[in-house]
Image (tube, grey):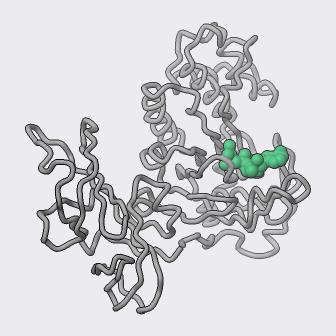
């Protein structure tokens, strides 16, 4: 578990207790504020010990969540439906109040501040654009609320239209736009007021696959261009892996692991993470030596990760890291039960001793044929370096 503790923020307790001041809208204000706080600008969103229950305590939506999201980071909250992702965003945005814990944005404690005083903006799952307003009126909405000058609003709207590539569509109503275009209007509206942090709650889930893939790339481009901290929520592990600088994997109101996509995929810290991110084979095993394990079937395996003998643990290996070998070769003996052709890859389902099933994946190259047939005996080679040892 690598939940990061903020390093330099809240230089003193006095600073932390400072009464919250209204956020400074606009880039110039933001930069000035950043400069004045010096090194504290490193952490954009600092959540500490957040607890939130619903239904009179019957549902613990957040069970002690601490996370430090860095400035200008594309940070993703990933987890199954109901794990508390939206609740965490709503606490940061101020739509809910926590039972315990604190939220600070760029060193400013937000406790008690209403949503509109917070230096954050939210893009929701449903596009939530105003159907009776044109594209440009939608984008101008937040700026009008802030009573900016007409000239400033016009300039900013033009800038946003170019950013989300909707030039020429400013007079249209949302009904005259595609789903992807409506979502871009929602994004432009949220970005127009230059929030320091943008919260995005499954913003792409209503789009079909092709459009979603396009929008994923656009969101990444936008984030790089505007240099705002993005806190992005998804239950889609592929989306999280491809878009994020770092990911927090959540389950049952807790953060289980925080890391880069590569760290999360290659070095999952918990069984849940290994299982949720990508596909994985999980083998219950007992450590019988520093690097040696025995499976329930009695077969033994070597791993690269040392530890003390005697522990009952779980070994995790990705389907693409295991491979087929002739029967009798080193590895686990098994019988091929099923071969599934998947276009780019072929997946082999192998029944091994003790009744466990392993999945192996091989990339299909030109002219490649399945090397074995169903019912054939094989060995499954599991390289020591590819086996993760999980404690829970
Ligand atoms: N207003 C509410 N009243 C009661 N239960 C809620 C409320 N909001 C969320 N919950 C519950 O809290 C848990 C976390 O919900 P949520 O944060 O929406 O999860 P996610 O966004 O990860 O799907 C769920 O069990 C959900 O049913
Ligand atoms: Mg949700």
Side of 132 where 362 appears, left or right: left
> Which part of the image, by quadrant, shows the N terminus?
bottom right
- Residue 124, quarter of picture: top right
- Residue 57 location in percent, x, y? 87, 59
- Residue 24, quarter of picture: top right
Side of 159 where 245 appears, left or right: left
- Residue 253 location in percent, x, y? 70, 59
Q: Residue 320: tell me if it is visible.
A: yes
Image position of 178 with respect to 370: above or below: above
Side of 109 where 216 appears, left or right: left
Q: Between 59 and 193, which is closer to the camera in this rendering?
A: 59
Q: Between 220 and 298, which is closer to the camera in this rendering?
A: 298
Q: At 39% across and 59% down in the image, what residue appears?
A: 280
Q: What count of labels does the image hold?
A: 0
Q: At 74% across and 64% down in the image, what residue appears?
A: 63
Image position of 225 with respect to 164: above or below: below
Q: Residue furthest left?
A: 367
Q: Residue 95: tell me if it is visible.
A: no
- Residue 20 location in percent, x, y? 84, 57
- Residue 105, quarter of picture: bottom right
Q: Residue furthest right?
A: 56
- Residue 177 location in percent, x, y? 58, 12
Q: Residue furthest front?
A: 375
Q: Between 110 and 316, which is closer to the camera in this rendering?
A: 316
Q: At 76% across and 56% down in the image, what residue appears?
A: 61
User: Which quadrant contains ligand 2?
Assistant: top right
Side of 103 where 174 appears, left or right: left
Q: Between 106 and 127, which is closer to the camera in this rendering?
A: 127
Q: At 41% across and 92% down in the image, what residue appears?
A: 309
């Amino acid at each position: 578990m690598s939940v990061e503790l903020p390093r330099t923020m809240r230089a003193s307790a006095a600073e932390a207790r400072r009464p919250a001041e209204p956020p400074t809208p606009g880039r110039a204000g933001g930069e000035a504020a950043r400069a004045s706080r010096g090194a504290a600008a490193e952490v954009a969103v600092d959540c500490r010990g957040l607890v939130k229950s619903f239904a009179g305590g019957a549902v613990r939506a957040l069970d002690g969540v601490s996370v430090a999201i860095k400035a200008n980071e594309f940070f993703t909250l990933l987890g199954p439906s109901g794990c508390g992702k939206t609740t965490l965003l709503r606490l940061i945005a101020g739509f809910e109040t926590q039972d315990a814990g604190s939220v600070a944005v760029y060193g400013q404690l937000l406790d008690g501040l209403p949503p509109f005083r917070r230096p954050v903006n939210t893009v929701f799952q449903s596009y939530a654009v105003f159907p009776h307003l044109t594209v440009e009126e939608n984008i101008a909405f937040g700026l009008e609320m802030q009573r900016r000058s007409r000239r400033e609003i016009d300039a900013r709207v033009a800038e946003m239209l170019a950013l989300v590539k909707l030039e020429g569509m400013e007079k249209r109503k949302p009904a005259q736009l595609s789903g992807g275009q409506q979502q871009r209007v929602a994004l432009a509206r949220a970005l127009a007021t230059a929030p320091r942090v943008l919260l995005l709650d499954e913003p792409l889930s209503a789009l079909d696959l092709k459009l979603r893939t396009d929008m994923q790339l656009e969101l990444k481009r936008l984030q790089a261009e505007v240099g705002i901290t993005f806190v992005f929520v998804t239950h889609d592990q592929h989306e999280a892996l491809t878009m994020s600088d770092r990911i927090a994997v959540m389950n049952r109101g807790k953060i289980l692991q925080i890391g880069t996509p590569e760290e999360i995929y290659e070095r999952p810290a918990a069984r849940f993470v290994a299982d949720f991110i990508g596909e994985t084979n999980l083998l219950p095993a007992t450590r019988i030596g520093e690097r040696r394990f025995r499976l329930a079937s009695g077969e033994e395996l070597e791993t690269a990760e040392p530890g003390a003998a005697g522990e009952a643990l779980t070994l995790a290996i990705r389907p693409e890291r295991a491979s087929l070998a002739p029967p009798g070769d080193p590895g686990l003996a098994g019988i091929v039960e099923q071969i599934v052709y998947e276009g780019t890859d072929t997946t082999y389902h192998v029944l091994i001793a003790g009744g466990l099933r392993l999945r192996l994946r091989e990339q299909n190259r030109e002219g490649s044929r399945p090397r074995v047939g169903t019912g054939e005996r094989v060995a499954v080679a599991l390289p020591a370096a590819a086996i993760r040892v999980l404690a829970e």
